Image: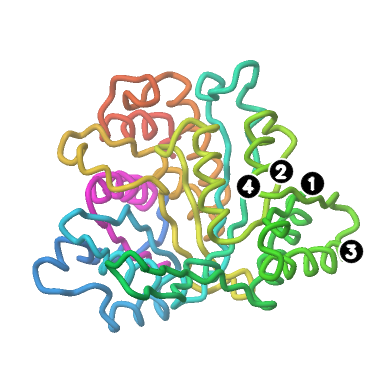
Amino acid sequence: MKKIAIIGGDGVGPEVVAEGVRVLDWFRARRGFELDLWHLDLGAERYLRDGTTFPAAARDAIFHDCAAVLLGALGDARVPGFEHARDILFGMRVGFDLYANVRPVRALSDDLVPLRGRLAKDVDFVVFRENTEGVYAGVGGQLRRGTADEIAINEDINTRKGVERIIRAAFAFARRNGKTRLLMSDKSNAMRHAHELWQRVFHEVRGEYPEVAASHLYIDALCFELVRDPSQFQVIVTNNLFGDIVTDLGAALQGGLGVAASVSFNPEHPDRVKLFEPVHGSAPKLVGLGRANPVATLLCVAMLFEELGFLSAASELEIAIRAAVRAKETTPDLGGTLGTRGVTDAVLRRLSPA
């Protein structure tokens, strides 16, 4: 029995996560998958009600008992400091040491690719984003706040251990999946001290993977090349901040944030709980309208199946999602006319009942 923690989150998060749960329930009922879905009341509503962010008991139970977490978007204007979101997200990403954030960038349909002359086959790469260090480590502060002499600092934290393990994870993925090209991106020409470490470690590790053609681009050049010709990339590895930025660019190439899925995990401990998240925001203007795009969440479920070893189910589900998108059985942002629930219905109709 695989236990999966379900956290709807904020805004449209509960709406799209509910569609992911429908798919999980379908596979439980029709295929006999032994999945124990544990629904947790965490998010802005809970925080505003009683001040709870991420209780230690829930955190410990997730870490010790769960195989995966399906998490919706976090963020609510009523919590301007994002206390609940920070505690939940960093409580798992950093607290569980899920240092590899992996985001596949695959276009589902030719007409979703916004680049002239480019097709879905040209947008098919994966980004390995370091998930626990960098400027998101929260090291820094403010001095003379509110005065003309105010100083605000955030430190870019890079450790040898952190840099080496994400680079190794990316190379290992390339080798395991027959990928022949890997690119590392930094900004070592401007951030000479912090990112020289990335350069040095990258050149040391690449020699252990002679079958993978390893190259480097500064982050600004990478963004330029992704727009010019995304087909040249297979695996990209970069730091926390740049990974956050470049994957949103990748989402635009594949059809928008509504189709962008991710997983955070620890490759050195493959049995440790894995965190699956659609990468879109909480979209407060769409709450309650039934128009939020569930595709990213459904793709997260497909990734979850793959990570749990249900490989045929993962492939079947992704094929069904792709077919629904190509048939325009989608929400309006992808050119369709369906609502949130209708998209999931269209996907489920394409699954074999046996």
Q: Are marks 1 and 4 in contact (CB under 8 Å)?
A: no
Which amino acid, by three-letter code, is at mark 4? Val
* Residue that mark 1 sits on: 181
In the structure shown, which secondary structural element does the residue marked by tag 1 occupy? Answer: strand
* Residue 296 position in % (x across, y down): 42, 42
- Majority SS type along the magenta span: helix
Please give the range of residues in magenta: 1-30
Which labelled disc corresponds to residue 234? 2
* Residue that mark 4 sits on: 126
Q: In terms of depth relative to the viewer, which is nearer, 94 or 262?
A: 94
* Residue that mark 3 sits on: 207
Which amino acid, by three-letter code, is at mark 3? Gly
- Residue lying farthest front? 148
Q: CA distance from mark 3 to mark 1?
A: 14 Å
* Residue 116 position in % (x across, y down): 60, 17
* Residue at 24% from the left image edge and 45% from the top image edge: 12
Q: Which of the two labelled residues, at mark 4 and mark 3, occupies the earlier sequence position?
A: 4
In the structure shown, which secondary structural element does the residue marked by tag 2 occupy? Answer: loop
Q: CA distance from mark 1 to mark 4?
A: 11 Å
Which amino acid, by three-letter code, is at mark 2? Gln
Q: Is residue 179 left or right of residue 100?
A: right
Q: CA distance from mark 4 to mark 3?
A: 21 Å
Q: Which of the two labelled residues, at mark 2 and mark 1, occupies the earlier sequence position?
A: 1
